[in-house]
Amino acid sequence: RDWRGMVLLVGATSFGRASIIMAEGRALRDGLQAVIHGGYRNLEIEGDNMLVIQAIQDKVQIPWQVRNIIIEIKGLLAQCLQVTIRHIYREANMAADWLSKYGHSAPINFLISECHAPEFRNIIQEDWAGRTLVRRGT
């Protein structure tokens, strides 16, 4: 999304039976490739997989399963002018959560500038309006 919250690019793919950390890492790498190809260089990245986010930030040792992907991500980030990366909870990342579920069941990969699915549009509109989410306790 841009600084106003408007959707710039939407993408999803199925990674098959990949582990969560592999799927999250690959999704971030693929998304970065798309936005860099689109000419965007000032990025604010929010992710709900704390291990991937902390590995990119060098706060934890990179898990061997995603070492090459994290290295690729860092190389892509080096092409950007300004980058902010932070962890957010899944409940605050509903658009990405919806896309990952959709992509897992989608017959094809896609990258588009607009998504007309009513559920997705509702999530974006509610987020833009500042809907407050309550995180459930564990």
Image (tube, rainbow, N blue to C red):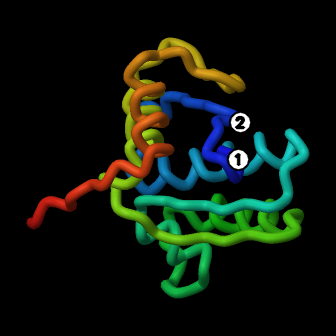
Residue 8's label in the rendered image is 2
Counting residues from the start of the chain, the first of labels 1 and 2 encountered is: 1
Residue nearer the viewer, 87 or 71: 87
Task: Give the residue at x 65% y 38%.
Answer: 6
Query: In this view of the protein, can residue 14 be seen by the observer?
Result: yes
Q: Which residue does the image show at 50% across and 66% down from the upper left? A: 52
Image spot of residue 78 (x, y percent): 84, 70
The vertical placement of 43 against 32, above or below, is below
Label annotation for residue 92: none
Name the amino acid, label 2: Leu
x then y, percent, for residue 99: 46, 33
* Alpha carbon distance from label 1 to label 2: 6 Å
Left or right of residue 91, residue 121 in this image = right
Where does the image place residue 87, in percent across and percent down from the top left? 46, 69
Q: Identify whether 31 is placed above or below 89.
A: above
The local secondary structure at tag 1 comes to loop
- Total numbered circles: 2
Q: Nearer the viewer, residue 118 or 38?
A: 118
Question: Looking at the rendering, in which quadrant would you find the C terminus?
Answer: bottom left
Quadrant of the image for the N terminus?
top right
Labels 1 and 2 touching (C-beta < 8 A): yes
Tell me the amino acid under the disc marked 1.
Asp
- Furthest-left residue in view? 138
Disc 1 designates what residue? 2
Q: Which one is nearer the viewer's eye here, 62 or 90?
A: 90
Q: Is residue 138 left or right of residue 94?
A: left
Label 2: state its secondary structure: loop
- The 10 Å Cα crowd at callout 2, few under 14, some 14 to 19, many 20 or more, is few
- Picture quadrant where residue 56 is located: bottom right
Relative height, residue 18 to residue 53 (above, below): above
Rendered residue at 61%/61% (across/down): 45
